[in-house]
Image (tube, rainbow, N blue to C red):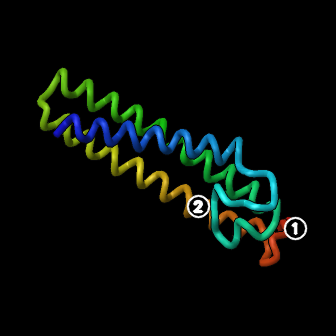
Amino acid sequence: MLWFFLILDIIFSAAALFGGYYMKFCAPKDNDMKMGVLTESAKKSRDTWEYANKACGKGWIAGGIAGLVLSAAATETAFFASEKVASIVGAAAAVIIVIIMSCSATTTIMGLKSKFDKDGKPVEKE
C-alpha cells in the first residue's frame, strides 16, 4: 500500500509543479486563452488572465513542493517506523496536495473578485 501512495504522491506533485510552472510562466499570451485558469472572471481581460494564472500557478507550485516533501517524509518513515505509518503519511500527502491546489484556485477566484470589477478592469484603490 505504501508504494501506491508514494507513486500517487509523485504523480500529484509532478502535475502540480508542471501545471503551476506553466500557469505562472508560460500561460498563453494570445487571445485564445485555452490553457490555464479557465473561469469566466479570469477570461474577462488580459489583466485578469495574467493575475489569475500567476496567482494560481504560485499556489500549485507550493502544493507540488509540499507533496514532494511529504513523500520524502513517508519514505523516511518507512525506513524508521512501520510501513503502516508510512502509508498513512503517504495518504495524508495526497490529500494535502489536493487541498492546497483547491485552495489556490479558490483564493485566486476571490482575488479576482476583489481586485477587478465586473468588466475586468482593475479596481481603483482609495
- Measuring from the top left, give residue 74's x and y in whole percent: 27, 32
- Residue at 26% in and 24% down: 76
Foreground of the two, 27 or 121: 27
Q: Quadrant of residue 44?
A: bottom right
Number of labelled discs? 2
**Residue at which label 2 appears:** 107
**Rendered residue at 34%/33% (across/down):** 71
| In the image, residue 10 above or below residue 52 | above
Q: What's the residue type where badge 2 is placed?
A: Thr
Question: In the rendered image, which quarter contains the N terminus?
Answer: top left
Q: Assess disc 1: are there few (<14), some (14-19) or many (≥20) residues with their C-alpha within 10 Å of its C-alpha.
A: few
In-front residue for pair 25/30: 30
Q: Which residue is mark 1?
A: 124
Q: Earlier in the sequence, mark 1 or mark 2?
A: 2
Q: Nearer the viewer, mark 1 or mark 2?
A: 2
Three-letter amino acid code of the residue under disc 1? Glu
